[in-house]
């Protein structure tokens, strides 16, 4: 086992000495907001499939894919968190399956945000060709490509497993709680993960910033719809914020490792759960909150479903 996973194992030893009351409180602190956000995300997913305008508009199709990946990621991370709180140790194959699915869905969000940013760029800078370029077929191909890239990344990570004897791990229980570090302690894989994360962050960030710059320059043209350009600029800024938050999960484990060496067990456990809510849970629900409030088409339908299908008078807001 590598030094990194050993350090993380030491940081999770504190869970073994928690009282039942401590574990119950920690579970509630993290599970209640997660359940609330899952309800909102689930309602948003249902909303995006409830009307033809959502199913046949490319940006709503992309939004559905983004929200589906975020919701799945939130479910998987919450399951792993509750398993750790309840002191449940898994077999290596089960843990590997859960963490691989979590990594797969985590990689979808930044890729989808890139596609959504490019769609807004085309809408403002090439309005006459937007309907020709951004079609349902091309959108579906872009979604398939994002899932393929994330799947290829996880397949490449899986190749590092070939150096281990997998037969002996088939039915063996893990020595620690199920985490990506504890399940797959390999320095080469860790180096690959860092390289891929840096590459993805830089590439996605440049794509969103370039789209924003293109929209700003296009807004100066007399032929450009100023209102549409302003809305696109605000949307792209939100995409940049979303991108930063979706990639913030990459600093979760390094923060825990640094904390485990500097603070007491009690402080570590509580700070760990605060980081979990802010870094893991919150970014996965912002998509629903942002689009549910800003989008004039989604907002009344979302509120209608959230309020038990009771009609509400909704004042129009910014698009």
Image (cartoon, rainbow, N blue to C red):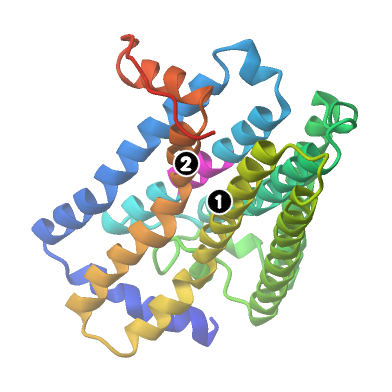
Under circle 1, the secondary element is helix
Rendered-image quadrant of the C terminus: top right
Residue at position x 49%, y 70% from top?
182
Predominant secondary structure, magenta span: helix
Residue extending farthest bottom:
262
Residue 247 horizontal/vertical position (percent): 57, 62
Residue 143 horizontal/vertical position (percent): 75, 38
Residue that carries the numbered disc 2 in the rendered image: 290
Depicted 230 relative to depicted 273: above or below: above
Identify the mark nearer the N-term, 2 or 1: 1
Residue 250 horizontal/vertical position (percent): 54, 68
Is 294 part of what is drawn in magenta? no
Q: Distance between the Cα atoms at labels 2 and 1?
A: 8 Å
Q: Quadrant of residue 152?
A: bottom right
**Which of these two is toward me, 96 or 200?**
200
Horizontal relation, residue 69 to residue 129: left or right: left
Q: Give the range drawn in magenta.
A: 69-76
Estimate how packed mark 1 is, as few (under 14), some (14 to 19) or many (20 or more) residues with alpha carbons within 10 Å.
some
Residue at position x 54%, y 57% from top?
241
Under circle 2, the secondary element is helix
Q: Quadrant of residue 13?
A: bottom left
Residue that carries the numbered disc 1 in the rendered image: 238
Q: Is residue 100 visible?
A: no
Could you tell me if the residues under marks 2 and 1 are in contact, i.e. CB atoms within 8 Å? yes
Depicted 3 relative to depicted 237: above or below: below
């Amino acid at each position: 086992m590598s030094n990194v996973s050993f350090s993380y194992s030491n940081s999770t030893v504190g869970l073994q000495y928690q009282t039942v009351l401590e574990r119950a409180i920690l579970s509630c602190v993290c599970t209640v907001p997660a359940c609330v956000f899952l309800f909102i995300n689930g309602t948003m997913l249902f909303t995006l499939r409830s009307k033809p305008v959502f199913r046949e508009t490319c940006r709503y199709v992309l939004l559905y894919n983004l929200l589906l990946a975020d919701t799945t990621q939130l479910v998987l991370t919450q399951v792993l968190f509750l398993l750790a709180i309840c002191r449940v140790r898994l077999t290596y194959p089960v843990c590997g399956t859960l963490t691989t699915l979590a990594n797969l869905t985590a990689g979808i969000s930044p890729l989808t945000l890139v596609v959504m940013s490019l769609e807004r760029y085309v809408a403002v800078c090439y309005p006459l060709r937007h309907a020709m370029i951004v079609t349902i077929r091309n959108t579906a191909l872009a979604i398939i490509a994002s899932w393929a890239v994330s799947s290829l990344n996880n397949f490449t990570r899986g190749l590092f497993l070939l150096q281990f004897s997998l037969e002996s791990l088939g039915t063996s229980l893990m020595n620690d709680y199920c985490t990506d570090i504890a399940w797959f302690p390999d320095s080469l894989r860790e180096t690959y993960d860092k390289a891929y994360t840096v590459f993805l962050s830089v590439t996605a960030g440049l794509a969103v910033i370039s789209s924003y710059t293109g929209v700003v320059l296009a807004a100066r043209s007399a032929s450009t719809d100023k209102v549409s350009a302003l809305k696109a600029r605000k949307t792209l800024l939100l995409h940049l914020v979303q991108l930063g938050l979706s990639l913030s999960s990459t600093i979760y484990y390094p923060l825990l490792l640094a904390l485990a060496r500097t603070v007491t067990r009690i402080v570590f456990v509580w700070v760990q759960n605060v980081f979990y809510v802010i870094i893991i849970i919150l970014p996965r629900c912002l998509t629903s909150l942002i689009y549910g409030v800003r989008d004039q088409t989604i907002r009344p339908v979302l509120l209608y479903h959230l309020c038990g299908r009771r009609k509400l008078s909704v004042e129009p807001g910014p698009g």
